[in-house]
Amino acid sequence: MTCPRIEINLNKVSHNAKFLVALYATKNINVIAVMKGVCGDSVIADTLVKSGMTSLADSRISNLHKLRYSGINVPLMLLRVPMLSEAEEVVKSVDISLNSELLTLKVLSKYAVAHNTIHKVILMVELGDLREGIMPHEMIDLVVQVIALEGIKLVGIGTNLACFGGVKPDDNNMGHLSSIANQLEEKFGLQFEFISGGSSANYNWFMFTKEVKRINHLRLGESIYLGCEPLLGKPIPELFTDAFTLIAEVIEVKTKPSLPYGEIGQNAFGNIPVFEDRGSMRRAILGIGIQDVAISGLEPLMDIEILGASSDHLVINTKKISLKVGDEVSFHLNYGALLSAMTSPYVAKEYQASMEYLDVQMTE
Ligand SMILES: *Cc1c(COP(=O)(O)O)cnc(C)c1O
């Protein structure tokens, strides 16, 4: 079989999606499936829609474009605040975008009018993580101007945490977002459709909070695909953490020293590598490298040790495992590794599913 490849168990992805939709619904929170971790894969998108995800999101317009033209028929949301250079495409192929800049909103408005459409926007509020977002005290002035823009409909506010500054979603920042929503709705006579509190990182807040207040929307990627919450990396009970498996093939096995010999200079990446002398060891090379996947996010499913990688080679210590040329070695991926492997054109995607299972799940 083709190597390297990523095996995608659609039944497990489907189970995770259904579970999370139902879980968040217990406190009236709607979720949107974030596709960037799987590079906007349309087979996975189709599975997610059949599993109850009523809309899809991505940070890249190219992925949303691909989804739109693959026949996916649910609302699409752009997560990264738009570039001016992509504003026309945003208005044409996306239903909702997250925004934080008046200039960009004005350009979106211009194109929405030109294309005779209404583009929905959510304004992002800065609540401490210091990536995108408007400072809370500047919200009122901005809303005054946004509601006056033709072709633009303000449908809500949102925030993003736990991405840049590592700030945890908690009752404090979620309460703040709720009170900003109340204040804006009252002042401008609006009724927001979305008060979008965050991402997979909101899981622990959600589980332990006494009240979610006005939060009615979350944008979920990692927890659907990897079955864990990102802040502590803990598995979420009842979810599959092994829906994705990366497989690479052995191309050399030899007993060699553990310490490079000869005069040492920089390696292929401009670093001077440091190794410990552990005597001779059984080493194998796998036909996978940095061009295929973020190696640091791989965890072997057998007892071997990753020694390092270059662009096309992964060197391992086989320890007590007897490997031979042609054998396959499997890995669990973290979110960064998943994202890179799904994005790499060198990694084959292999979907595994019993369609009966999906159909049964759908009609339950
Ligand atoms: C990536 C992203 C998400 C999803 O984050 P996960 O940790 O994968 O759930 C949500 N919102 C925004 C703005 C994002 O960029």
Image: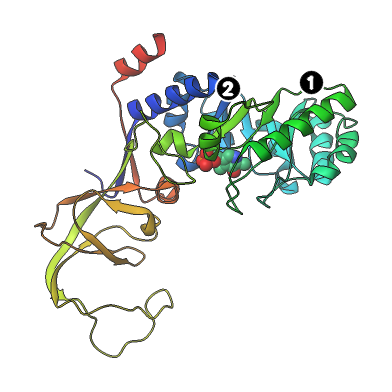
Whole-number angstrom distance, CA of label 2 to CA of label 1 = 22 Å
Residue 228 location in percent, x, y? 42, 39
For this rendering, which residue is in front, 173 or 333? 173
Residue drawn at 84 percent across, 44 percent down = 137
Residue drawn at 25 percent across, 89 percent down = 262
* Amino acid at dot 1: Gln
Say whether residue 165 is visible: yes
Image quarter for ligand 1: top right
Say whether residue 61 is visible: no
For this rendering, which residue is in front, 186 or 343? 186
SS at circle 1: loop
Disc 2 packing (10 Å; few <14; some 14–19; many ≥20): some
Q: Quadrant of residue 157?
A: top right
Residue 208 location in percent, x, y? 53, 31
Circle on res. 301? none
* Amino acid at dot 2: Val
Q: Quick check: 295 left or right of 28? A: left
Judging by the rendered image, the residue that carries numbered circle 1 is 191
Question: Above or below — where is 170 with respect to 344?
Answer: above
Q: Viewer-nearest of labels 2 and 1? A: 1
Q: Quick check: 94 left or right of 287? A: right
Residue drawn at 58 percent across, 47 percent down = 162
SS at circle 2: loop
Image quarter in which the C terminus is found: top left
Judging by the rendered image, the residue that carries numbered circle 2 is 74
Residue drawn at 40 percent across, 39 percent down = 226
